[in-house]
Image (spheres, rainbow, N blue to C red):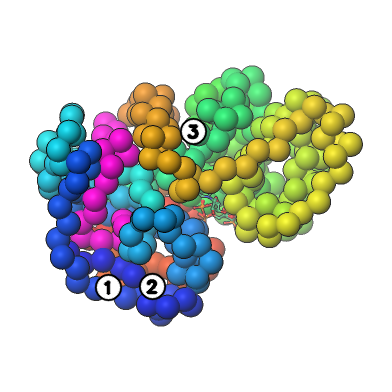
Amino acid sequence: MRAVFADGAGGPEVLVVRDLPDPSPGPGEVVLEVAAAGLNRADLLQRQGFYPPPPGASDVLGMECSGTVAAVGEGVDGWSVGDQACALLSAGAYATHVTVPAGQLMPVPTGVGLVEAAALPEVACTVWSNVFMLAHLAADEVLLVHGGAGGIGSFAIQLASAAGARVLTTAGTADKRAFCESLGAERAIDYHDEDFVAVVKEVTDGRGADVVLDNMGASYLQRNVDALATEGRLVVIGMQGGTKGEIDLSTLLRKRGAVLATTLRARPAEEKAAICASVVEHVWPLVADGAVRPIVEGTVPLDDVRRAHELMESGSHTGKILLTV
Ligand SMILES: NC(=O)c1ccc[n+]([C@@H]2O[C@H](COP(=O)([O-])OP(=O)(O)OC[C@H]3O[C@@H](n4cnc5c(N)ncnc54)[C@H](OP(=O)(O)O)[C@@H]3O)[C@@H](O)[C@H]2O)c1
């Protein structure tokens, strides 16, 4: 098999493709022959040396992929050689083959191509587990999702709209804002030139957002709390704006608000399996009937992985970037 490693910490130039012995599945695992792998911001951080894989996980980059089952380990039920699937991983997806705990394997939703399916595991599991399982967004509530044109954001807009919520979002360019509104956002806010707190208040008649899904962390912390409605829930999933912030707790107390934060990658396998099962039950039917679709900026061959990282770093993309094998 062939796989992508970071040879030291640095820019895209540290990424190298190397040969490895072919994997065989342990008990409870399957081996996937990879069709495509999705890029994630965390992959850039890992390459830069800031985000090592969890203990015991492979050094091969990549946290999601799609492919065909090539071997099935002892004790695995429901999967056979030749089945098509997509997978949520701690590591190892940028490769021709990868070993996957069976609980983190999901069928390819009806109507989605095998390559496209690599765009789904991270966004579906992250958005579903945070916005719905944790923050309990309800049909008549308002979601503010930052970065609506990105991989996570474009999925969150669609899923929350399909669930009957009102969706507000932020994006950096006019084209991206128009795209977010085409996906179902009621209003896409210019994060360069508009005050998102003021817009959220204006659009909700002063009430604020019931749930905020945040990718920025420290730099937006106080403003996100300011944008919350009474009993609102802020869920921080990214730290693009730094890790150390300060909030005025009196605002949070007065609103009876909650600040939540999670990361998917570090969760134990049983929790990931439970999230995957819930996604298959609740999200895949929405994908199958076309209410929610994978958004793919483009595909790049595995051997051009450096170019794929440059593209994500440029920030010009909309939706997901995929590596094809
Ligand atoms: N905790 C978890 O389990 C988990 C899992 C997956 C992802 N994440 C995090 O979720 C975030 C999004 O990931 P992704 O894969 O969707 O990456 P992505 O496709 O590269 O999206 C990044 C987004 O950040 C937006 N952005 C940049 N500056 C902003 C600002 N000042 N205000 C608002 N938005 C801004 C970009 O908006 P424009 O394109 O409009 O500039 C873009 O939509 C990342 O921080 C990632 O680490 C967390």
The disc labelled 3 sits on which kind of residue?
A: Trp
Query: Mark 3 Cα within 10 Å, few/some/many (few <14, many 20+)?
Result: many
Q: Which of 83 and 100 is in front in this view?
A: 100
Q: Position of residue 159 (x, y in %)?
A: 49, 32
Report how far apart the C-alphas of labels 2 and 3 lie in the structure.
Answer: 30 Å
Quadrant of the drawing holding the N terminus: bottom left
In the figure, 7 relative to 233: above or below?
below
What is the magenta range?
A: 91-114
**Residue displayed at 76% across by 54% down:** 245
Q: Earlier in the sequence, mark 3 or mark 1?
A: 1
Report how far apart the C-alphas of labels 2 and 1 lie in the structure.
Answer: 9 Å
Name the residue tied to disc 1.
17
Q: Say what secondary structure mark 3 lies in.
A: helix
Name the residue tied to disc 2.
6
Which numbered mark, 2 or 3, is in the foreground of this view?
A: 2
Q: Where is residue 233 in the image (x, y as percent from the top left)?
A: 69, 32
Query: Mark 1 Cα within 10 Å, few/some/many (few <14, many 20+)?
Result: some
Q: Nearer the viewer, residue 172 or 91?
A: 91
Q: Earlier in the sequence, mark 2 or mark 1?
A: 2
Q: Position of residue 285 (x, y in %)?
A: 36, 25
Name the residue tied to disc 3.
128
